[in-house]
Image (tube, rainbow, N blue to C red):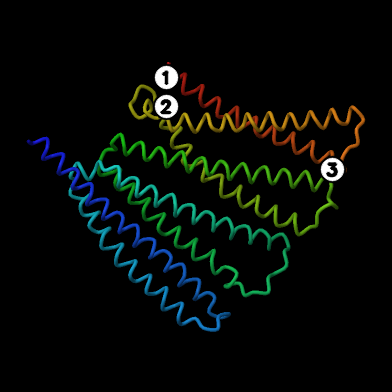
């Protein structure tokens, strides 16, 4: 009877928590889009014929979303502060928090990358736009501000939760999925930016007259912004999980090294890097054999060969790094 009552209590609390989190999520989304729309309208007010109606509409969304989110989030925070084990060990709460942190981090970083791209273009001598500066930044700045604010707040909540209660196994799994997902997004962004910069450099050195300066400026700005943004997004969570995995003879390190999420992450990049190496080497050998056999070569032959060589070398570095991480995990286990 006691077990049945305890199980019923857990189920009821889980349903209640799901209801509160669902309404908190809905209110937060309404609050976010209301804030973004209001800031965007105010920044475009100079060029808009009628701005009163959009301001009223977005203000209503902002107000209602704030009331819905704060009311339900206050109850959730109060329940967690009671110290009840069911609340402290809730995996649903962690899923909600890490989902919000991931979404708002992507929003802030993508808008920050677009803003940085535009600044780099202007620094490289791009002609100024005919639109007012506030109008040009009317979407990027509100998204950056909203994403950064809610990202920082929910990340602080996660840190406070970690200080108040020990991490349960299911909560650790949620945290691990978040960390490796962010690291994967950051690494792909970083590699895309680095490859773009190297390819643009090769094109500039081998065939500078083939493409106009405007194309070079835009592509270099985009690749630079992706590199600058992707590097910390990959490095920060990756260093955290690497420190945890390097802990010998302790439960956190053993669980980290044996986690399925970590193995999927490492072997995924080993697999993708292997495909890139084989494809690039095959492309490189094909062009070399084409030249040796005396076939007609394309006008951008040197560019194609160097591009394939650069991608193969970069993919080889990615493969080696992640393969060494797999070997290191094996040595720690032994």
Disc sitting over residue 333 in the figure: 1
Instruction: Find residue 119 and report its image quarter.
Output: bottom right
Query: Tag on residue 300?
Result: 3
Nearer-the-camera pick, 266 or 235 = 266
Residue bearing mark 2: 257
Residue 82: x and y, percent?
Answer: 17, 49
**Left or right for 27, reference 297:** left
Give the residue displayed 64% in from the left and 74% down from the top: 131
- The mark that comes first in sequence, 3 or 1, is 3
Which residue is drawn at the image coordinates 34% and 49% (left, top)?
96
16 vs 65: above or below: above
Q: Which mark is residue 292?
A: none
Circles 2 and 1 in contact, beta carbons < 8 Å: yes
- 41 or 251: nearer the viewer: 41
Q: Nearer the viewer, mark 3 or mark 1?
A: 3
Which circle, 3 or 2, is nearer the viewer?
Answer: 3
Q: Which residue lies furthest to the top in this view?
A: 334
Which element is circle 3 on?
loop
Position of the C terminus by quadrant: top left
The residue most toward the left is 1
């Amino acid at each position: 009877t006691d077990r049945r009552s305890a199980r019923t209590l857990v189920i009821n609390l889980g349903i209640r928590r799901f209801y509160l989190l669902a309404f908190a999520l809905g209110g937060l989304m309404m609050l976010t889009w209301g804030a973004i729309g209001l800031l965007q309208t105010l920044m475009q007010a100079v060029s808009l014929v009628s701005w009163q109606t959009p301001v009223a509409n977005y203000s209503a969304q902002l107000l209602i979303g704030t009331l819905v989110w704060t009311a339900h989030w206050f109850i959730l925070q109060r329940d967690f502060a009671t110290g009840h084990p069911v609340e402290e060990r809730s995996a649903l709460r962690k899923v909600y928090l890490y989902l919000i942190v991931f979404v708002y981090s992507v929003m802030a970083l993508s808008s920050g990358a677009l803003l940085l791209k535009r600044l780099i273009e202007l620094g490289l001598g791009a002609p100024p736009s005919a639109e007012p500066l506030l109008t040009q930044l009317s979407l990027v700045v509100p998204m950056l501000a909203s994403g950064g604010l809610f990202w920082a707040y929910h990340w602080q909540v996660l840190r406070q939760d970690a200080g108040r209660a020990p991490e349960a196994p299911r909560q650790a799994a949620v945290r691990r999925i978040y960390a490796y997902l962010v690291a994967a997004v950051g690494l792909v962004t970083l590699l895309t930016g680095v490859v773009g910069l190297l390819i643009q450099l090769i094109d500039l050195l081998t065939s500078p007259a083939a493409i106009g300066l405007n194309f070079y400026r835009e592509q270099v700005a985009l690749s630079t912004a992706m590199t600058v943004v992707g590097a910390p997004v990959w490095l920060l969570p990756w260093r955290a999980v690497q420190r945890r995995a390097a802990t010998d003879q302790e439960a956190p390190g053993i669980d980290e090294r044996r986690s399925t999420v970590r193995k999927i992450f490492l072997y995924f990049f080993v697999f993708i890097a292997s495909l890139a190496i084989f494809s690039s080497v095959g492309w490189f050998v094909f062009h070399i054999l084409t030249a040796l056999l005396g076939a007609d070569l394309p006008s951008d032959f040197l560019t194609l060969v160097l591009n394939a060589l650069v991608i193969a070398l970069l993919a080889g570095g990615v493969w080696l790094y992640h393969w060494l991480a797999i070997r290191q995990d094996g040595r720690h286990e032994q």
